[in-house]
Protein backbone atom coordinates (compact mmCIF):
# COMPACT_ATOMS: atom_id res chain seq x y z
CA UNK A 1 0.00 0.00 0.00
CA UNK A 2 1.32 3.43 -0.93
CA UNK A 3 0.14 6.68 0.55
CA UNK A 4 -0.79 9.46 -1.81
CA UNK A 5 -1.35 13.11 -1.41
CA UNK A 6 -4.97 14.07 -1.14
CA UNK A 7 -4.80 17.12 -3.45
CA UNK A 8 -2.41 19.20 -5.52
CA UNK A 9 1.24 19.26 -4.44
CA UNK A 10 2.10 21.88 -1.85
CA UNK A 11 4.22 24.78 -3.08
CA UNK A 12 7.13 23.92 -0.77
CA UNK A 13 7.09 20.29 -1.92
CA UNK A 14 7.26 21.44 -5.51
CA UNK A 15 10.24 23.68 -4.79
CA UNK A 16 12.00 20.81 -3.06
CA UNK A 17 11.17 18.32 -5.80
CA UNK A 18 12.40 20.58 -8.58
CA UNK A 19 15.36 22.34 -6.92
CA UNK A 20 16.43 20.27 -3.91
CA UNK A 21 16.73 20.80 -0.15
CA UNK A 22 19.21 23.71 -0.18
CA UNK A 23 17.07 25.71 -2.61
CA UNK A 24 13.98 25.01 -0.56
CA UNK A 25 15.65 26.47 2.53
CA UNK A 26 16.91 29.50 0.62
CA UNK A 27 13.56 30.12 -1.03
CA UNK A 28 11.75 29.81 2.31
CA UNK A 29 14.16 32.24 4.00
CA UNK A 30 13.55 34.78 1.23
CA UNK A 31 9.78 34.43 1.54
CA UNK A 32 10.00 34.69 5.32
CA UNK A 33 12.02 37.91 5.10
CA UNK A 34 9.67 39.44 2.55
CA UNK A 35 6.33 38.18 3.85
CA UNK A 36 6.10 36.18 7.09
CA UNK A 37 2.38 35.59 6.62
CA UNK A 38 2.98 34.05 3.21
CA UNK A 39 5.72 31.80 4.60
CA UNK A 40 3.36 30.55 7.32
CA UNK A 41 0.66 30.02 4.71
CA UNK A 42 3.02 27.86 2.66
CA UNK A 43 3.82 25.78 5.75
CA UNK A 44 0.18 25.36 6.69
CA UNK A 45 -0.71 23.86 3.32
CA UNK A 46 -2.80 20.79 4.10
CA UNK A 47 -0.96 18.84 1.40
CA UNK A 48 2.54 19.56 2.66
CA UNK A 49 4.68 16.44 3.00
CA UNK A 50 6.83 15.74 6.02
CA UNK A 51 10.22 15.71 4.23
CA UNK A 52 9.87 19.39 3.22
CA UNK A 53 8.71 20.27 6.71
CA UNK A 54 11.69 18.42 8.17
CA UNK A 55 14.12 20.23 5.88
CA UNK A 56 12.67 23.54 7.09
CA UNK A 57 12.48 22.59 10.76
CA UNK A 58 15.55 24.65 11.77
CA UNK A 59 14.08 27.71 10.02
CA UNK A 60 10.77 27.14 11.81
CA UNK A 61 12.57 27.03 15.15
CA UNK A 62 14.80 30.03 14.48
CA UNK A 63 11.89 32.19 13.32
CA UNK A 64 9.68 30.90 16.18
CA UNK A 65 6.94 29.97 13.74
CA UNK A 66 5.49 26.94 15.49
CA UNK A 67 2.89 28.98 17.37
CA UNK A 68 1.50 30.15 14.03
CA UNK A 69 1.18 26.67 12.56
CA UNK A 70 -1.95 24.55 12.39
CA UNK A 71 -2.14 21.98 15.17
CA UNK A 72 -0.75 19.01 13.19
CA UNK A 73 2.34 20.91 12.08
CA UNK A 74 2.82 22.62 15.44
CA UNK A 75 2.86 19.21 17.11
CA UNK A 76 5.23 17.88 14.46
CA UNK A 77 7.57 20.83 15.09
CA UNK A 78 7.44 20.17 18.82
CA UNK A 79 8.10 16.47 18.26
CA UNK A 80 11.16 17.28 16.15
CA UNK A 81 12.50 19.52 18.90
CA UNK A 82 12.00 16.91 21.62
CA UNK A 83 15.09 15.65 23.32
CA UNK A 84 14.82 11.99 24.15
CA UNK A 85 16.21 12.43 27.65
CA UNK A 86 13.48 14.84 28.70
CA UNK A 87 11.66 13.47 31.70
CA UNK A 88 8.29 15.05 30.84
CA UNK A 89 8.36 13.81 27.27
CA UNK A 90 5.47 11.42 27.69
CA UNK A 91 3.00 14.18 28.46
CA UNK A 92 4.08 15.92 25.26
CA UNK A 93 3.52 12.91 23.01
CA UNK A 94 -0.04 12.31 24.16
CA UNK A 95 -1.50 14.76 21.66
CA UNK A 96 0.94 14.18 18.86
CA UNK A 97 -0.74 11.16 17.23
CA UNK A 98 -2.07 12.90 14.06
CA UNK A 99 1.30 14.53 13.47
CA UNK A 100 3.16 11.23 13.81
CA UNK A 101 0.81 9.57 11.38
CA UNK A 102 1.26 12.38 8.88
CA UNK A 103 5.04 12.08 9.16
CA UNK A 104 4.93 8.43 8.16
CA UNK A 105 2.19 8.73 5.56
CA UNK A 106 4.01 11.45 3.67
CA UNK A 107 7.64 10.81 4.52
CA UNK A 108 8.16 7.04 4.57
CA UNK A 109 10.18 6.65 1.42
CA UNK A 110 12.71 9.45 1.80
CA UNK A 111 16.16 9.65 3.29
CA UNK A 112 17.26 13.07 4.52
CA UNK A 113 19.99 11.76 6.80
CA UNK A 114 20.17 9.66 9.92
CA UNK A 115 18.36 12.09 12.19
CA UNK A 116 15.39 12.09 9.81
CA UNK A 117 15.31 8.29 9.74
CA UNK A 118 15.55 8.12 13.53
CA UNK A 119 12.59 10.47 13.90
CA UNK A 120 10.52 8.22 11.67
CA UNK A 121 11.61 5.16 13.69
CA UNK A 122 10.47 6.87 16.88
CA UNK A 123 7.19 7.96 15.29
CA UNK A 124 6.52 4.36 14.17
CA UNK A 125 7.28 3.01 17.64
CA UNK A 126 5.00 5.53 19.34
CA UNK A 127 2.15 4.83 16.94
CA UNK A 128 2.17 1.06 17.43
CA UNK A 129 3.34 0.85 21.02
CA UNK A 130 1.66 3.81 22.70
CA UNK A 131 -1.30 4.56 20.45
CA UNK A 132 -1.89 0.95 19.36
CA UNK A 133 -2.58 2.31 15.87
CA UNK A 134 -2.67 -0.66 13.49
CA UNK A 135 -3.83 1.41 10.53
CA UNK A 136 -0.27 2.67 10.14
CA UNK A 137 1.20 -0.80 9.58
CA UNK A 138 1.05 -0.61 5.74
CA UNK A 139 3.03 2.63 5.94
CA UNK A 140 5.60 1.09 8.27
CA UNK A 141 5.89 -1.93 5.95
CA UNK A 142 6.56 0.44 3.04
CA UNK A 143 9.27 2.12 5.10
CA UNK A 144 10.88 -1.20 6.01
CA UNK A 145 11.18 -2.22 2.38
CA UNK A 146 12.36 1.23 1.29
CA UNK A 147 15.17 0.88 3.85
CA UNK A 148 15.95 -2.65 2.61
CA UNK A 149 16.24 -1.42 -0.96
CA UNK A 150 18.40 1.49 0.14
CA UNK A 151 20.54 -0.60 2.54
CA UNK A 152 19.56 1.63 5.46
CA UNK A 153 18.94 0.55 9.06
CA UNK A 154 15.48 -0.90 9.55
CA UNK A 155 15.67 -2.79 12.84
CA UNK A 156 13.72 -0.31 14.92
CA UNK A 157 11.00 -0.20 12.27
CA UNK A 158 10.67 -3.97 12.37
CA UNK A 159 10.44 -3.76 16.15
CA UNK A 160 7.69 -1.12 15.83
CA UNK A 161 5.88 -3.21 13.21
CA UNK A 162 5.94 -6.38 15.31
CA UNK A 163 5.00 -4.53 18.49
CA UNK A 164 1.57 -3.98 16.98
CA UNK A 165 1.13 -7.64 17.96
CA UNK A 166 -1.12 -8.27 15.00
CA UNK A 167 -0.25 -11.61 13.36
CA UNK A 168 -2.30 -10.93 10.24
CA UNK A 169 -0.13 -7.90 9.50
CA UNK A 170 2.58 -10.37 8.48
CA UNK A 171 0.71 -10.53 5.16
CA UNK A 172 2.12 -7.06 4.42
CA UNK A 173 5.61 -8.58 4.66
CA UNK A 174 4.71 -11.83 2.88
CA UNK A 175 3.44 -9.89 -0.10
CA UNK A 176 7.05 -8.86 -0.80
CA UNK A 177 8.15 -12.48 -1.09
CA UNK A 178 6.86 -12.10 -4.66
CA UNK A 179 8.61 -8.79 -5.27
CA UNK A 180 10.73 -8.58 -8.44
CA UNK A 181 13.19 -6.54 -6.37
CA UNK A 182 15.63 -9.08 -4.92
CA UNK A 183 16.47 -6.93 -1.88
CA UNK A 184 12.77 -6.76 -0.96
CA UNK A 185 12.17 -10.49 -1.35
CA UNK A 186 15.38 -11.23 0.62
CA UNK A 187 14.20 -8.97 3.44
CA UNK A 188 10.77 -10.64 3.46
CA UNK A 189 12.38 -14.10 3.57
CA UNK A 190 14.65 -12.98 6.40
CA UNK A 191 11.64 -11.85 8.44
CA UNK A 192 9.44 -14.83 7.66
CA UNK A 193 12.08 -17.57 7.88
CA UNK A 194 10.39 -18.89 11.04
CA UNK A 195 7.50 -20.17 8.91
CA UNK A 196 7.89 -23.75 7.62
CA UNK A 197 8.70 -23.71 3.90
CA UNK A 198 10.31 -20.27 3.86
CA UNK A 199 14.07 -20.43 3.68
CA UNK A 200 15.94 -17.15 3.92
CA UNK A 201 18.50 -18.31 1.36
CA UNK A 202 16.13 -19.83 -1.19
CA UNK A 203 15.69 -17.38 -4.05
CA UNK A 204 13.40 -17.59 -7.09
CA UNK A 205 10.49 -19.27 -5.32
CA UNK A 206 8.57 -16.19 -4.26
CA UNK A 207 5.12 -17.29 -5.33
CA UNK A 208 5.56 -20.75 -3.81
CA UNK A 209 6.82 -19.23 -0.54
CA UNK A 210 3.91 -16.80 -0.50
CA UNK A 211 1.50 -19.72 -0.78
CA UNK A 212 3.28 -21.50 2.11
CA UNK A 213 2.82 -18.34 4.15
CA UNK A 214 -0.90 -18.20 3.28
CA UNK A 215 -1.34 -21.86 4.24
CA UNK A 216 0.45 -21.31 7.52
CA UNK A 217 -1.49 -18.17 8.43
CA UNK A 218 -4.81 -19.74 7.47
CA UNK A 219 -4.10 -22.75 9.66
CA UNK A 220 -2.51 -20.97 12.63
CA UNK A 221 -3.72 -17.34 12.53
CA UNK A 222 -6.35 -17.53 15.27
CA UNK A 223 -3.95 -19.36 17.59
CA UNK A 224 -0.82 -17.21 17.27
CA UNK A 225 0.84 -15.67 20.30
CA UNK A 226 3.31 -12.79 20.08
CA UNK A 227 6.67 -14.01 21.41
CA UNK A 228 8.53 -10.72 21.31
CA UNK A 229 11.49 -11.92 19.24
CA UNK A 230 12.92 -9.45 16.74
CA UNK A 231 16.22 -9.10 14.90
CA UNK A 232 17.58 -7.58 18.09
CA UNK A 233 17.03 -10.90 19.82
CA UNK A 234 18.28 -13.53 17.44
CA UNK A 235 19.49 -14.41 13.98
CA UNK A 236 16.16 -16.00 13.05
CA UNK A 237 13.44 -14.48 15.18
CA UNK A 238 10.13 -16.22 15.75
CA UNK A 239 7.81 -13.29 16.45
CA UNK A 240 4.67 -15.43 16.60
CA UNK A 241 4.18 -19.02 17.61
CA UNK A 242 1.01 -21.14 17.65
CA UNK A 243 -0.49 -21.93 21.03
CA UNK A 244 -0.87 -25.68 20.48
CA UNK A 245 -3.51 -26.24 23.15
CA UNK A 246 -5.70 -23.52 21.58
CA UNK A 247 -5.24 -24.93 18.08
CA UNK A 248 -6.13 -28.37 19.41
CA UNK A 249 -9.39 -27.12 20.88
CA UNK A 250 -10.11 -24.64 18.09
CA UNK A 251 -10.26 -21.81 20.63
CA UNK A 252 -9.05 -18.37 19.51
CA UNK A 253 -6.36 -16.65 21.56
CA UNK A 254 -5.36 -13.08 22.39
CA UNK A 255 -2.20 -12.59 20.33
CA UNK A 256 -0.77 -10.40 23.11
CA UNK A 257 -0.45 -13.16 25.67
CA UNK A 258 -1.74 -16.37 24.09
CA UNK A 259 -4.64 -16.69 26.51
CA UNK A 260 -7.76 -18.40 25.21
CA UNK A 261 -10.57 -15.87 24.66
CA UNK A 262 -13.59 -18.03 25.47
CA UNK A 263 -14.54 -19.65 28.76
CA UNK A 264 -13.98 -23.40 28.62
CA UNK A 265 -16.39 -26.16 29.55
CA UNK A 266 -15.52 -28.67 32.23
CA UNK A 267 -14.80 -31.28 29.56
CA UNK A 268 -12.57 -28.88 27.60
CA UNK A 269 -10.59 -28.06 30.71
CA UNK A 270 -10.16 -31.78 31.37
CA UNK A 271 -9.03 -32.34 27.79
CA UNK A 272 -6.49 -29.56 28.10
CA UNK A 273 -5.08 -30.98 31.32
CA UNK A 274 -4.42 -34.22 29.47
CA UNK A 275 -3.10 -32.34 26.47
CA UNK A 276 -0.69 -30.35 28.63
CA UNK A 277 0.82 -33.60 29.91
CA UNK A 278 1.80 -34.73 26.41
CA UNK A 279 5.30 -34.30 25.00
CA UNK A 280 5.90 -31.30 22.74
CA UNK A 281 5.90 -33.26 19.47
CA UNK A 282 2.70 -35.07 20.46
CA UNK A 283 1.05 -31.74 21.19
CA UNK A 284 2.01 -30.43 17.76
CA UNK A 285 0.80 -33.56 16.04
CA UNK A 286 -2.52 -33.51 17.84
CA UNK A 287 -3.06 -29.77 17.31
CA UNK A 288 -2.35 -30.04 13.57
CA UNK A 289 -4.56 -33.10 13.18
CA UNK A 290 -7.37 -31.48 15.14
CA UNK A 291 -7.27 -28.28 13.06
CA UNK A 292 -7.26 -30.28 9.81
CA UNK A 293 -10.13 -32.50 10.88
CA UNK A 294 -12.17 -29.54 12.11
CA UNK A 295 -11.77 -27.83 8.75
CA UNK A 296 -12.65 -30.89 6.70
CA UNK A 297 -15.60 -32.30 8.64
CA UNK A 298 -16.79 -30.62 11.81
CA UNK A 299 -19.11 -33.48 12.80
CA UNK A 300 -16.30 -36.01 12.51
CA UNK A 301 -14.12 -33.67 14.57
CA UNK A 302 -16.72 -33.46 17.34
CA UNK A 303 -16.78 -37.26 17.49
CA UNK A 304 -12.98 -37.41 17.54
CA UNK A 305 -12.51 -34.76 20.23
CA UNK A 306 -14.88 -36.73 22.46
CA UNK A 307 -12.58 -39.77 22.35
CA UNK A 308 -10.00 -40.31 25.07
CA UNK A 309 -6.75 -38.46 24.37
CA UNK A 310 -5.01 -41.81 23.87
CA UNK A 311 -7.43 -42.70 21.07
CA UNK A 312 -7.15 -39.22 19.60
CA UNK A 313 -3.40 -39.60 19.46
CA UNK A 314 -3.69 -43.02 17.87
CA UNK A 315 -5.94 -41.63 15.13
CA UNK A 316 -3.56 -38.74 14.52
CA UNK A 317 -0.52 -41.03 14.38
CA UNK A 318 -2.40 -43.32 12.02
CA UNK A 319 -3.05 -40.49 9.60
CA UNK A 320 0.49 -39.27 9.93
CA UNK A 321 1.89 -42.67 8.99
CA UNK A 322 -0.13 -42.58 5.75
CA UNK A 323 1.42 -39.21 4.71
CA UNK B 1 25.88 -36.41 32.64
CA UNK B 2 28.94 -36.36 30.40
CA UNK B 3 29.39 -39.20 27.96
CA UNK B 4 32.48 -39.73 25.82
CA UNK B 5 32.30 -42.39 23.10
CA UNK B 6 29.36 -44.04 24.86
CA UNK B 7 30.87 -44.14 28.34
CA UNK B 8 29.83 -41.92 31.20
CA UNK B 9 32.81 -40.13 32.74
CA UNK B 10 33.56 -38.76 36.18
CA UNK B 11 35.57 -35.74 37.29
CA UNK B 12 38.75 -37.78 37.34
CA UNK B 13 38.65 -38.21 33.57
CA UNK B 14 38.55 -34.47 32.97
CA UNK B 15 41.78 -32.59 32.47
CA UNK B 16 42.48 -30.65 35.63
CA UNK B 17 43.05 -27.40 33.78
CA UNK B 18 39.27 -27.33 33.14
CA UNK B 19 38.51 -27.93 36.78
CA UNK B 20 40.87 -25.15 37.80
CA UNK B 21 39.20 -22.50 35.68
CA UNK B 22 35.94 -21.35 37.34
CA UNK B 23 34.14 -20.87 34.02
CA UNK B 24 34.90 -24.35 32.69
CA UNK B 25 34.37 -25.85 36.13
CA UNK B 26 30.86 -24.39 36.08
CA UNK B 27 30.25 -25.89 32.63
CA UNK B 28 31.54 -29.30 33.74
CA UNK B 29 29.52 -29.26 36.96
CA UNK B 30 26.35 -28.22 35.14
CA UNK B 31 26.80 -30.99 32.59
CA UNK B 32 27.57 -33.61 35.22
CA UNK B 33 24.63 -32.69 37.41
CA UNK B 34 22.16 -32.53 34.53
CA UNK B 35 19.63 -35.20 33.60
CA UNK B 36 20.56 -34.44 29.99
CA UNK B 37 23.37 -36.57 28.59
CA UNK B 38 26.07 -34.41 27.00
CA UNK B 39 27.69 -36.65 24.40
CA UNK B 40 31.13 -36.13 22.93
CA UNK B 41 32.88 -38.27 20.35
CA UNK B 42 36.27 -37.90 22.03
CA UNK B 43 38.04 -36.25 24.98
CA UNK B 44 39.36 -33.71 22.47
CA UNK B 45 35.84 -32.73 21.48
CA UNK B 46 34.93 -32.15 25.13
CA UNK B 47 38.14 -30.17 25.58
CA UNK B 48 37.27 -27.99 22.61
CA UNK B 49 33.78 -27.36 23.98
CA UNK B 50 35.22 -26.28 27.31
CA UNK B 51 38.02 -24.20 25.75
CA UNK B 52 35.57 -22.42 23.50
CA UNK B 53 33.23 -21.74 26.44
CA UNK B 54 36.13 -20.22 28.38
CA UNK B 55 37.26 -18.26 25.33
CA UNK B 56 33.78 -16.79 24.83
CA UNK B 57 33.77 -15.52 28.40
CA UNK B 58 37.30 -14.20 28.04
CA UNK B 59 36.46 -12.47 24.74
CA UNK B 60 33.55 -10.77 26.52
CA UNK B 61 35.97 -9.57 29.24
CA UNK B 62 38.32 -8.29 26.52
CA UNK B 63 35.56 -6.43 24.71
CA UNK B 64 34.39 -4.94 27.98
CA UNK B 65 37.89 -3.56 28.63
CA UNK B 66 38.62 -2.55 25.04
CA UNK B 67 37.12 0.94 25.08
CA UNK B 68 34.55 0.24 22.34
CA UNK B 69 31.34 2.27 22.58
CA UNK B 70 27.68 1.48 22.18
CA UNK B 71 26.00 3.07 19.17
CA UNK B 72 22.84 2.38 17.23
CA UNK B 73 23.20 1.24 13.62
CA UNK B 74 22.94 4.89 12.56
CA UNK B 75 26.02 5.93 14.49
CA UNK B 76 28.30 2.89 14.03
CA UNK B 77 31.96 3.59 13.50
CA UNK B 78 35.03 1.45 12.82
CA UNK B 79 38.72 1.57 12.00
CA UNK B 80 38.54 2.11 8.26
CA UNK B 81 42.05 0.76 7.84
CA UNK B 82 40.55 -2.71 8.18
CA UNK B 83 36.80 -2.30 7.64
CA UNK B 84 34.38 -0.60 5.30
CA UNK B 85 31.43 0.96 7.13
CA UNK B 86 28.25 0.01 5.24
CA UNK B 87 25.21 2.34 5.01
CA UNK B 88 23.22 0.10 7.35
CA UNK B 89 25.89 0.39 10.05
CA UNK B 90 27.76 -2.86 9.41
CA UNK B 91 31.51 -3.50 9.12
CA UNK B 92 32.65 -5.29 5.96
CA UNK B 93 36.22 -6.63 5.84
CA UNK B 94 38.40 -4.64 3.43
CA UNK B 95 39.93 -6.43 0.49
CA UNK B 96 43.38 -7.76 1.24
CA UNK B 97 42.96 -7.60 5.03
CA UNK B 98 43.29 -10.78 7.06
CA UNK B 99 40.09 -11.50 9.02
CA UNK B 100 42.01 -12.31 12.22
CA UNK B 101 43.96 -9.04 12.08
CA UNK B 102 40.82 -6.97 11.51
CA UNK B 103 38.90 -8.76 14.25
CA UNK B 104 41.72 -8.38 16.77
CA UNK B 105 41.89 -4.67 15.97
CA UNK B 106 38.43 -4.20 17.47
CA UNK B 107 39.72 -5.55 20.78
CA UNK B 108 43.00 -3.61 20.57
CA UNK B 109 41.80 -0.25 19.24
CA UNK B 110 38.39 -0.21 20.87
CA UNK B 111 37.90 3.57 20.99
CA UNK B 112 37.84 3.59 17.18
CA UNK B 113 34.72 1.42 17.20
CA UNK B 114 31.06 1.90 18.07
CA UNK B 115 28.25 -0.57 17.39
CA UNK B 116 25.10 -2.03 18.89
CA UNK B 117 24.68 -5.00 21.17
CA UNK B 118 23.82 -7.83 18.75
CA UNK B 119 26.92 -7.06 16.67
CA UNK B 120 28.94 -7.12 19.90
CA UNK B 121 27.75 -10.65 20.64
CA UNK B 122 28.80 -11.86 17.19
CA UNK B 123 32.22 -10.20 17.62
CA UNK B 124 32.68 -12.04 20.92
CA UNK B 125 31.78 -15.33 19.24
CA UNK B 126 34.20 -14.71 16.37
CA UNK B 127 36.97 -13.73 18.76
CA UNK B 128 36.43 -16.87 20.85
CA UNK B 129 36.49 -18.92 17.66
CA UNK B 130 39.73 -17.28 16.56
CA UNK B 131 41.29 -18.01 19.93
CA UNK B 132 40.03 -21.60 19.78
CA UNK B 133 40.90 -22.65 16.23
CA UNK B 134 43.88 -20.43 15.52
CA UNK B 135 44.56 -17.78 12.90
CA UNK B 136 45.15 -20.01 9.88
CA UNK B 137 41.83 -21.82 10.14
CA UNK B 138 40.02 -18.64 11.10
CA UNK B 139 41.31 -16.74 8.07
CA UNK B 140 40.39 -19.61 5.80
CA UNK B 141 36.87 -20.02 7.18
CA UNK B 142 35.89 -16.39 7.55
CA UNK B 143 37.47 -14.63 4.59
CA UNK B 144 34.28 -12.60 3.91
CA UNK B 145 33.79 -11.29 7.40
CA UNK B 146 30.78 -8.98 7.72
CA UNK B 147 29.80 -7.72 11.15
CA UNK B 148 26.27 -6.40 11.30
CA UNK B 149 23.50 -7.30 13.67
CA UNK B 150 23.00 -11.06 14.07
CA UNK B 151 24.51 -11.84 10.66
CA UNK B 152 27.27 -14.44 10.82
CA UNK B 153 28.99 -17.00 8.69
CA UNK B 154 27.45 -20.48 8.38
CA UNK B 155 30.63 -21.96 9.87
CA UNK B 156 30.13 -20.01 13.09
CA UNK B 157 26.63 -21.49 13.10
CA UNK B 158 25.10 -19.82 16.15
CA UNK B 159 21.76 -21.44 16.90
CA UNK B 160 19.11 -20.63 19.49
CA UNK B 161 16.98 -22.96 21.52
CA UNK B 162 15.50 -23.29 24.96
CA UNK B 163 18.06 -25.62 26.50
CA UNK B 164 17.80 -27.97 29.44
CA UNK B 165 20.77 -26.25 31.07
CA UNK B 166 22.52 -22.91 30.77
CA UNK B 167 26.28 -22.47 30.60
CA UNK B 168 28.79 -19.65 30.85
CA UNK B 169 29.39 -18.51 27.27
CA UNK B 170 25.72 -18.71 26.29
CA UNK B 171 24.18 -15.74 24.53
CA UNK B 172 21.01 -14.67 26.31
CA UNK B 173 18.55 -11.83 25.89
CA UNK B 174 16.90 -9.57 28.43
CA UNK B 175 13.64 -8.39 26.88
CA UNK B 176 12.01 -5.13 27.89
CA UNK B 177 8.44 -5.60 26.62
CA UNK B 178 7.13 -2.27 27.90
CA UNK B 179 10.03 -0.12 26.72
CA UNK B 180 9.32 3.53 26.07
CA UNK B 181 9.57 3.98 22.27
CA UNK B 182 11.45 7.20 22.92
CA UNK B 183 14.24 5.03 24.35
CA UNK B 184 13.99 2.33 21.72
CA UNK B 185 17.61 1.25 22.21
CA UNK B 186 16.50 -0.13 25.59
CA UNK B 187 14.06 -2.61 24.00
CA UNK B 188 16.34 -5.34 25.28
CA UNK B 189 19.91 -6.32 25.96
CA UNK B 190 21.92 -9.09 24.37
CA UNK B 191 24.32 -10.57 26.88
CA UNK B 192 26.96 -13.24 27.30
CA UNK B 193 26.54 -15.40 30.39
CA UNK B 194 29.83 -14.99 32.26
CA UNK B 195 29.27 -17.62 34.94
CA UNK B 196 28.50 -17.18 38.61
CA UNK B 197 25.26 -15.33 37.80
CA UNK B 198 26.91 -12.48 35.89
CA UNK B 199 26.22 -11.23 32.36
CA UNK B 200 28.16 -9.04 29.97
CA UNK B 201 26.14 -6.58 27.89
CA UNK B 202 27.75 -4.20 25.42
CA UNK B 203 27.46 -0.72 26.84
CA UNK B 204 26.34 -1.83 30.28
CA UNK B 205 29.33 -3.89 31.39
CA UNK B 206 29.30 -7.03 33.56
CA UNK B 207 26.38 -7.20 35.97
CA UNK B 208 24.02 -9.60 37.71
CA UNK B 209 20.63 -10.23 36.12
CA UNK B 210 18.78 -8.13 38.70
CA UNK B 211 20.81 -5.02 37.90
CA UNK B 212 20.21 -5.42 34.16
CA UNK B 213 16.47 -5.85 34.67
CA UNK B 214 16.41 -2.82 36.95
CA UNK B 215 18.22 -0.74 34.32
CA UNK B 216 15.81 -1.79 31.58
CA UNK B 217 12.78 -1.17 33.79
CA UNK B 218 13.89 2.44 34.24
CA UNK B 219 13.37 2.92 30.47
CA UNK B 220 9.80 1.67 30.33
CA UNK B 221 6.82 3.66 29.11
CA UNK B 222 4.77 5.45 31.78
CA UNK B 223 2.15 3.16 33.27
CA UNK B 224 4.09 0.05 32.25
CA UNK B 225 3.07 -3.08 34.09
CA UNK B 226 5.40 -5.66 32.56
CA UNK B 227 8.93 -6.02 33.90
CA UNK B 228 11.96 -6.71 31.75
CA UNK B 229 12.92 -10.38 31.93
CA UNK B 230 15.54 -12.88 30.82
CA UNK B 231 14.24 -14.90 27.86
CA UNK B 232 14.54 -18.70 27.96
CA UNK B 233 16.40 -19.10 24.67
CA UNK B 234 20.17 -19.40 24.57
CA UNK B 235 22.44 -18.98 21.55
CA UNK B 236 25.48 -21.16 21.06
CA UNK B 237 27.99 -21.49 18.23
CA UNK B 238 28.41 -24.76 16.34
CA UNK B 239 30.95 -26.20 18.79
CA UNK B 240 31.22 -29.60 17.14
CA UNK B 241 31.56 -28.20 13.66
CA UNK B 242 34.22 -25.72 14.73
CA UNK B 243 36.14 -28.36 16.69
CA UNK B 244 37.28 -30.01 13.46
CA UNK B 245 39.19 -26.84 12.50
CA UNK B 246 41.04 -26.51 15.80
CA UNK B 247 44.79 -26.58 15.81
CA UNK B 248 46.58 -27.77 18.94
CA UNK B 249 45.82 -24.48 20.66
CA UNK B 250 42.15 -25.29 20.32
CA UNK B 251 42.30 -28.03 22.91
CA UNK B 252 43.36 -25.71 25.67
CA UNK B 253 42.30 -22.28 26.81
CA UNK B 254 43.80 -19.51 24.66
CA UNK B 255 46.86 -17.76 25.99
CA UNK B 256 44.75 -14.80 27.10
CA UNK B 257 42.34 -17.12 28.90
CA UNK B 258 45.21 -18.95 30.60
CA UNK B 259 46.73 -15.62 31.62
CA UNK B 260 43.40 -14.50 32.95
CA UNK B 261 43.25 -17.54 35.17
CA UNK B 262 46.73 -16.82 36.50
CA UNK B 263 45.90 -13.18 37.12
CA UNK B 264 42.47 -13.55 38.64
CA UNK B 265 42.73 -16.69 40.72
CA UNK B 266 45.14 -18.67 42.84
CA UNK B 267 45.02 -22.35 41.94
CA UNK B 268 46.26 -24.92 44.43
CA UNK B 269 46.66 -28.56 43.41
CA UNK B 270 47.02 -31.11 46.23
CA UNK B 271 47.12 -34.60 44.79
CA UNK B 272 43.84 -35.06 42.90
CA UNK B 273 42.23 -32.06 44.56
CA UNK B 274 42.22 -28.70 42.80
CA UNK B 275 41.16 -25.59 44.70
CA UNK B 276 40.68 -22.15 43.17
CA UNK B 277 40.77 -19.02 45.34
Image: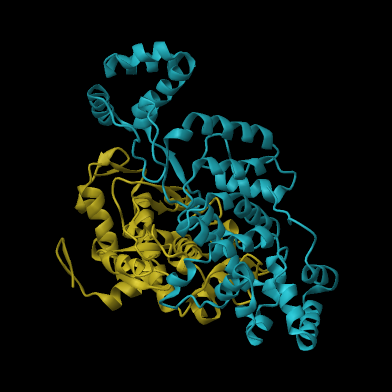
Residue A253: image x %, image y %? 39, 36
Output the letter for the chain in yellow. B
Q: Pick whichever, B21 or A46, lies toward us.
A: A46
Horizontally, residue B114 falls left or right of residue B162, namely right
- Image height of B219 relative to A260, above or below: below
Relative depth, front residue between B117 and A154: A154
Residue located 58% across and 48% down the image: A190
The quarter of the displayed image where residue B25 is located: bottom left
The image position of residue B41, as x and y in percent, is 37, 43
A302 relative to B134 in the view: left or right = left
Q: Is residue A160 above or below residue A285?
A: below
Instruction: Chain letter for cyan, please.
Output: A
Seen from the viewer's position, the closer of residues A59 and B58 is A59
Query: What percent of the width, then of the height, locates residue B97?
Result: 65, 70
Q: Residue at x 26, y 49 (%)?
A: B31
Looking at the image, which residue is at 62% across and 67% down? A117
- On the question of residue B147 being in view, the answer is no
Q: Is residue A49 visible?
A: yes
Locate residue A301: give its quadrant.
top left
Amino acid sequence: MKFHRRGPAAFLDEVRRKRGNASLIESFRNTLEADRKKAVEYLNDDNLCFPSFYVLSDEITKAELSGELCERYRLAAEFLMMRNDKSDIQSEVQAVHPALKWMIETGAEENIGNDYLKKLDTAAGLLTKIYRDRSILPGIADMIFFRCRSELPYHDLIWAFLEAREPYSLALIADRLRSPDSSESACARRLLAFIPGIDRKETGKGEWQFQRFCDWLEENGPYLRYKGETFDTTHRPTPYTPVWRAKYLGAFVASDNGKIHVSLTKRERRLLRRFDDLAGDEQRLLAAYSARKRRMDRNAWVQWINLSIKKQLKAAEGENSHD
Amino acid sequence: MIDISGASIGLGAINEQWLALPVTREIVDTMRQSRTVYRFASPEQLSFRLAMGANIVEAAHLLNRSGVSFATFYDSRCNERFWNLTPNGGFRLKNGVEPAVALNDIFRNGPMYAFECATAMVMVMYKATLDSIGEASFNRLFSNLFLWDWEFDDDLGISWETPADYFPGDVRYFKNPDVNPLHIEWQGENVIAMGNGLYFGHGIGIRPAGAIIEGLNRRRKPGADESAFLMDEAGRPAFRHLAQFADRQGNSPSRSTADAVKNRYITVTLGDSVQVY
